[in-house]
Image (cartoon, rainbow, N blue to C red):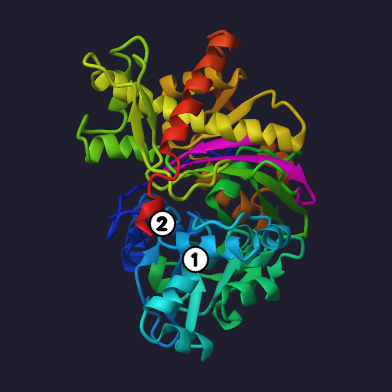
Amino acid sequence: DREGAIQGLAQQEFTQHFPRPGWVEHDPEEIWSSQLSVAREVLSKVDPGSIAALGITNQRETTLIWDRRTGKPIHNAIVWQDRRTAPFCRALVEAGHQPEVQKRSGLVIDPYFSGSKICWLLDNVPGARADAEAGHLAFGTVDSWLVHRLTGGRLHLTDVTNASRTMLMNLERGAWDPWLLDTLGVPESLLPEIVASSAVYGETDTDVLGARLPIAGIGGDQQAALFGQSCFEPGQAKNTYGTGCFLLLNVGERPQPSKNALVSTAGWTLGGGARAFALEGSVFIGGAVVQWLRDELQLFSSAPEIEDMAKTVDDNGGVVLVPAFAGLGAPHWDPYARGLIVGLTRGSNRGHIARAALEGIARQVADVMTAMEKDAEIELSELRVDGGAAANDLLMQFQADILQVPVVRPKVLETTALGAAYFAGLATGFWRDTSDIQANFQVDRVFEPAVAADRAERERARWSTALVRAREWAQSED
């Protein structure tokens, strides 16, 4: 509603596929069917005629290619966490392309981003490269895929925030970069049109959601959360605790290059052309470590139970868990790192491991924030948080303790969806401007640091020692 309160909610897990170690895939048809299902479920609770607009937010770098002639995917989606293109990325670095790639795209060369995933699909799906060069195929991140399906294939577009995560867009110009396309070997005919994050792009087909709804906002999940947290001014930062953790700092109307292994990214472009850019640090495994403890080790049956399990012990008992299941993201950028549990003794138990897992999330975020403060040459006075794991009080207290700054949790934790709604609502006049949105921000709780700074520093030093042992573990897999 106009106050930013949720009027209807539906959620549905979908299958994660792990065909090989370090590989992560999704079924594009299941992405579509699950999204359609939850959208219809929400619409069953409200009058479709009361919907002002539809906004889309998505995990950003996940890569799909489909056949324009049939609308069918040529392969499973390659998920942002996937590491299969590490050798290709290493070859690009060894060829000396890193400085120019970073200058143009704002990104470091890493399997995380979409560009290398596109190349893998073109080179490993029989006939794909020839079909692409003939103009028969279309690439998109999940936002593009959803728009394609919502409009019956009429629209092929992506917003600037998602495009900025492909390693193919010139960050300053907001357009596909010919040098990047040529260097990575990606035909331009594959690519969607780049549009603003807040604009009316078209309407859904009536038979999809039962009404012709304007599609009016698109934002990659982390930029949408930055907007949903009302971080409209340079110097404001937020961290989202989802599958991964993503710390973004608004740096204003011009991109700011990173000197500390972060990435520069588009924050958003509004309908009138107003732009914002951000520095970002990405932690690949955040809440996913809780899923791992639940599903693979079966330490508990539901994710929220980790907090009670971690509270059964007073501290971590010397146990450190580095959740580098998909390598390490910023500021380390090691695709060959792997997960590690160290410090185990005969007295270590499930509570220690649960506590170490939560601390591992918070410590990764602290590494990113330190690099961000160096880049921005400021000390952040607070950190705004959101995402599912932000509901975990113990994790939020760990975060405040390790950072030694207050952690501010808003009443609405679904700020990724909220940001997408704000983009769509601004485009259709549901909200007049960002001052309307700023007025909606409400704090649930502020977590103040509860340990001394020297203790926090000792804990970070132990974490750094564990990181060294996790680094380059899978180097021999090539």
Tell me residue 12's x, y (percent).
31, 50
Which residue shows up at 65% across the image and 70% down it? Answer: 180
| SS of the residue under disc 2 | loop
**Above or below, comparing residue 438 to residue 47 in the picture:** above
- Residue underneath mark 2: 82
- SS type, badge 1: helix
Q: Main secondary structure of the magenta part?
A: strand
Image quarter in which the C terminus is found: bottom left
In x, y percent, where is residue 308? 30, 19
Work out whether residue 151 or residue 275 is closer to the camera in this orientation and state it.
275
N-terminal label among 2 and 1: 2
Indicate whether 390 appears above or below 55: above
Which residue, given by chain and number where applicable, does mark 1 sit on? 88
Q: Relative to residue 60, is residue 441 depicted above or below?
A: above
Residue shown at 52% from the left, 62% from the top: 89
| Residue 287 percent across, percent down from the top left | 39, 37
Q: Quadrant of residue 170?
A: bottom right
Q: Specify start and end residues of the magenta stretch as a single range.
A: 236-256
Residue 224 lies left or right of residue 374; in this view the side is left
Mark 2 residue type? Asp
What residue is at 53 percent from the left and 32 percent from the top?
365
